[in-house]
């Protein structure tokens, strides 16, 4: 498999209070480029043994330039308008070997084992350029080469027809954030006819990125001692199937620890640090099914989500709703008529992204919102392989929970800001697509 991607876009505003770039300046833009190659080979060595080997190589680079008429934005300052350039790059190559052994050839006692190793090079830097002349003034560069590896094992057990276990663990060795063992376990019990009870526990972690742990910026210093973010979660669900109808009721609890955030230091610099935890627990329910050509489904989640500060205070998590869900129905009209489908998603009122650090009055909130989407789709009988889909969507809320415009963040000289200007929603969208599937 080979993939190549290019994504270039304008940057109308960057950073808090438009500090790093003039607003809506055409010379400020960003670009991402990806190139990846993946080769995989699978073979059944014996009736009970399956082997898989995979090799991969990837490359990525990022480029951003920000134009500012204020020379002091560059470090050191330019004599005229400043063009501040940020660059990021990474390359990695690795392989993974995986083996699966079915002890009884009945898919009741299956062991999966795998190892993975990667050599990666990550780097980045900044350049200060005199915008009018293109003359390079100064810059910072930082690159590192690292080796990471992992080993994992999974055991599936089905000692009876109604009891199923899935046990696993993964060990990761990463030079950033330390090494860690991540266990997980699941049990499924067929409690009665069509009823299934599942209990799940899992742990995982995310090492700091190169940018978070090692990158140097004019006003940001690295922190190679920061720890990995960790997550522990448990879930219990009860599923019931009645004919073509499925019902689910569940409860979950998740805790994220050592969450990273960019913090100001007494020296005037910034640094990524392990700063807070996040607690999340709640209930979820869903239903789906079909009656002849009519299909339906709905789900709802009610969650209590809070950020816990180092001082032990609980804060609302910005842009995160505590209640959300969706519902959908479709009906295949008889004969040569199309299929009509209606879907809706909804979220409750939620705080904006600058609730905790924007210093706005009053606190910025986005209203409750629902999105309604209607589509018609059909396989055209006169042209085999040709189908169409037309439709549209409407969103009830005028704003999303993200502050727009140049005034974004806290200003120590201003004790109170006025109301936040939230980003406007695209409320009405229409679309039409044609698809052709080549016939064998």
Image (cartoon, rainbow, N blue to C red):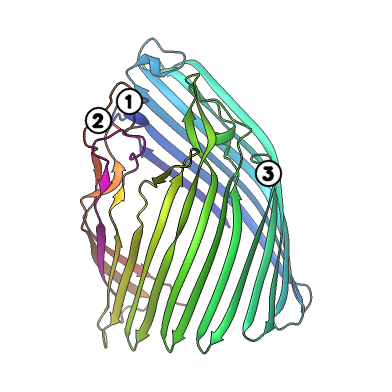
Whether residue 361 appears in magenta in the rendering, the answer is yes
Q: CA distance from mark 1 to mark 3?
A: 38 Å
Query: With 291 as the anchor, is 222 left or right in this view?
Result: right
Q: Which mark is residue 417?
A: 2
Mark 2 neighbour class, 10 Å CA radius: few under 14, some 14 to 19, many 20 or more: some
Q: Which mark is residue 214?
A: none
Residue 406 in view of the camera: yes
Element at label 1: loop
Q: Residue at (34%, 89%) from the top-left corner?
A: 292
Where does the N terminus fall, quadrant-wise? bottom right
Residue holding disc 3: 174
- The x and y percentages for residue 37 are 60, 52
Closer to viewer: mark 1 or mark 3: 1
Q: Which residues are magenta?
A: 353-377
Q: CA distance from mark 3 to mark 2?
A: 44 Å
Residue holding disc 1: 411
Closer to viewer: mark 3 or mark 2: 2
For residue 59, above or below residue 132: below
Q: Residue at (28%, 81%) from the top-left corner?
A: 331
Residue 330 in which image quadrant: bottom left
Element at label 2: loop
Query: First in sequence: mark 1 or mark 3?
Result: 3
For residue 193, above or below residue 172: below
Mark 1 neighbour class, 10 Å CA radius: few under 14, some 14 to 19, many 20 or more: some
Query: First in sequence: mark 3 or mark 2?
Result: 3
């Amino acid at each position: 498999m080979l993939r190549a991607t290019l994504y270039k876009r304008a940057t109308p505003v960057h950073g808090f209070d438009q500090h790093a770039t003039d607003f809506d300046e055409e010379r400020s833009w960003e670009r991402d480029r990806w190139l990846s190659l993946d080769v995989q080979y699978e073979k059944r060595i014996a009736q009970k043994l399956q082997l898989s080997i995979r090799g991969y190589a990837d490359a990525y680079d990022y480029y951003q330039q920000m134009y500012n008429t204020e020379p002091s934005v560059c470090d050191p300052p330019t004599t005229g308008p400043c063009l501040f350039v940020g660059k990021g790059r990474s390359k990695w190559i690795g392989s993974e070997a995986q083996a699966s052994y079915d002890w009884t050839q009945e898919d009741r006692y299956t062991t999966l084992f795998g190892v993975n190793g990667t050599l990666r090079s990550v780097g980045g830097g900044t350049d200060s350029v005199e915008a009018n002349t293109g003359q390079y003034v100064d810059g910072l560069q930082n690159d590192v080469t690292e080796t990471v590896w992992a080993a994992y094992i999974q055991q599936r057990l089905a000692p009876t027809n109604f009891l199923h276990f899935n046990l696993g663990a993964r060990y990761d060795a990463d030079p950033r954030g330390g090494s860690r063992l991540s266990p997980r376990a699941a049990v499924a019990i067929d409690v009665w006819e069509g009823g299934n009870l599942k209990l799940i526990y899992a742990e995982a972690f995310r090492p700091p990125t190169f940018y978070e742990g090692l990158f140097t910026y004019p006003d940001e210093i690295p922190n190679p001692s920061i720890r990995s973010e960790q997550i522990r979660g448990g879930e219990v669900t009860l599923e019931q199937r009645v004919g073509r109808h499925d019902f689910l009721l569940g409860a979950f609890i998740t805790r994220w620890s050592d969450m990273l955030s960019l913090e100001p230091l007494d020296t005037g610099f910034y640094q990524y640090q392990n700063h807070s935890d996040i607690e999340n627990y709640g209930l979820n329910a869903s239903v789906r099914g079909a009656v002849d050509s009519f299909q339906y489904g709905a789900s709802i989640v009610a969650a209590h989500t809070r950020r816990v500060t180092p001082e032990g205070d609980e804060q609302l998590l910005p842009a995160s709703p505590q209640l959300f869900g969706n519902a959908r129905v479709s009906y295949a009209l008889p004969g040569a008529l199309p299929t009509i489908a209606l879907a809706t998603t909804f979220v409750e009122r939620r705080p904006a992204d600058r609730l905790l650090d924007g210093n706005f009055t009053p606190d910025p909130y986005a209203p409750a919102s629902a999105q309604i989407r209607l589509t018609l789709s059909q396989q055209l009988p006169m042209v085999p392989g040709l189908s169409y889909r037309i439709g549209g969507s409407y969103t009830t809320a005028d704003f999303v929970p993200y502050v727009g415009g140049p005034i974004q963040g806290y200003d120590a000289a201003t004790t109170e800001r006025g109301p936040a200007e939230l980003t406007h929603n695209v409320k009405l969208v229409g679309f039409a697509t044609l698809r052709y599937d080549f016939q064998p």
